[in-house]
Structures are given as structure tokens and as C-alpha cells.
Image (tube, rainbow, N blue to C red):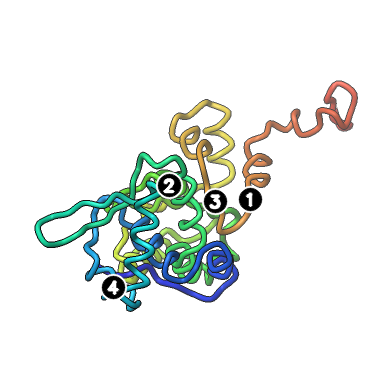
Amino acid sequence: MNVPYMSTNSNELLGECLFGKVRRQILSTLMSHPDRSFYVLELIRLLQSGRGAVQRELERLSRVGILIRVRRGNQVHFRVNRDCLIYRELRSIFAKTTGLVETLESILEPFFPEMGIVFIHGEYAAGTAGDESPIRLAVVGDVNPGRLGECARLFQERTGRRLAASLWTTRELRRGFTLGDSAVGSLLGGDKIFLRGSRTDLDVITTRQEDLFSGIFPGGTRPDR
């Protein structure tokens, strides 16, 4: 198993401002693998941190209910507490400030000129993904499907996580939204982590032309009608 890739970009620096080094490493590792537990010596080896610092942070995090502490024989295991009041918020923070998203960005970057909007959606963006949950990616643009498939292969090779990517044109999204297509509705709803573009860009695509002019012209009437 790999420890989440870490980088020194702005997102990672944001994580450093919010959490101390050892606490950030522990939470990043456990939040990225919510379906399994880790014993203390395993975490010390993975994080390459001192025994005392790791044990102190684990005890603090379990004391406030962020982690669950379980003894199994001679080993003490820790795992994330999905019932913690701020579990989803923490998953969201670490999704945006650890290297999984940054690795995906670096792989996709050469093709960004061909992509209009790119975002992660589904379980990972919502903070509910398990170890086996794929990272769901939506791409709006004119990128070659073969290139997107190669990006998915590289991502799995580097992170051990499967990338489930869907490719859309703006016309497909607008038509699906207008017709009430359930797949498009599911895609547009819920939490998102934008790699390129924004929620505003999506709103423009799925807004009917007459709505774009409402509030600008009396009665929403376009000047060319």
C-alpha cells in the first residue's frame, strides 16, 4: 500500500497551515483508506516519523472521536470514525489538500487545452469513498477518448486507485439536462472538486438561452426576437 503522494504546491501548503506535520500525515493516510485500520508500528514505518509523535497524535485524535482505537491481541489499531461529527468535512479537506488530486492534475495537464471543464464528483468529492471506490472524473470538451484512457491507466499505476472517467460535449450535457436525463442529473448534482473550470461554467452550459437574458431585458426577451 502506498502513502498518499505529497507535494509542495499551494494546496499542500494550505494543509500545512491547518494541521501539524505528523497529524496531517496520519489523517491523510487514514482518510484515504477509510475501510481499513492501521496498527501503530505500521503507521510509524509508513510515515517515517518518531514513535512518540505518532502515538501522541493517535491518542489525541481517538480521544476526540476522529479515530477509533481497537486492541487486537498485542496490537493497537486505529481507523477513521465515519460517525464523527466532522468526518465528511475532514475527508473533503484532505481530498483537496493531499496528493491524489495533484497527481491527477499533473497527468491531465498536457490535455487541459482540449478540455473545457474538468471535475471530480461522486463518492470521493463527497468524502464517502472507500478504499475500492473509483475516483469519478467528468471531462467536458473535445479530448480524444484514447488519451483519456491513457490518463486513467497512468493514474492507477501511480496511485493504486481506479479512475472512472466520462467524456461529455456541451451539447450532450445541455440536451441531457433539458430532457431530465438521470445520468446528467446525477453528474451535475452533489459535491465536486474542480480541476478546470467552475460551477459557474456548468451553470452556463445547463441554463436555457431564455434564462440567460432574464433580468437583463424586460420579460427576458432577447433583442433579436
Whole-Å distance between the Cαs marked 4 and 1?
39 Å
Residue beneath disc 3: 140
Q: Choose mark 2 or mark 3, whichever is in front.
A: 2
* Residue type pointed to by label 1: Ser
Counting residues from the start of the chain, the first of labels 2 and 1 encountered is: 2
Q: State the mark number for residue 44.
A: 4
What's under tag 2, amino acid-wise? Gly
- Say whether residue 154 is left or right of residue 225: left
Q: Disc 2 to disc 1, how far (Cα)?
A: 19 Å
**To which residue does mark 2 refer?**
127
Q: Residues within 10 Å of mark 3 (few under 14, many from 20)?
A: many
Front residue of 13/206: it is 13
Quadrant occupied by the N terminus:
bottom left
Q: Whole-percent x and y of residue 33? A: 31, 56
Q: Secondary structure at mark 3?
A: strand
Q: Which comes sooner in the sequence, label 2 or label 3?
A: 2
* N-term mark: 4 or 1: 4
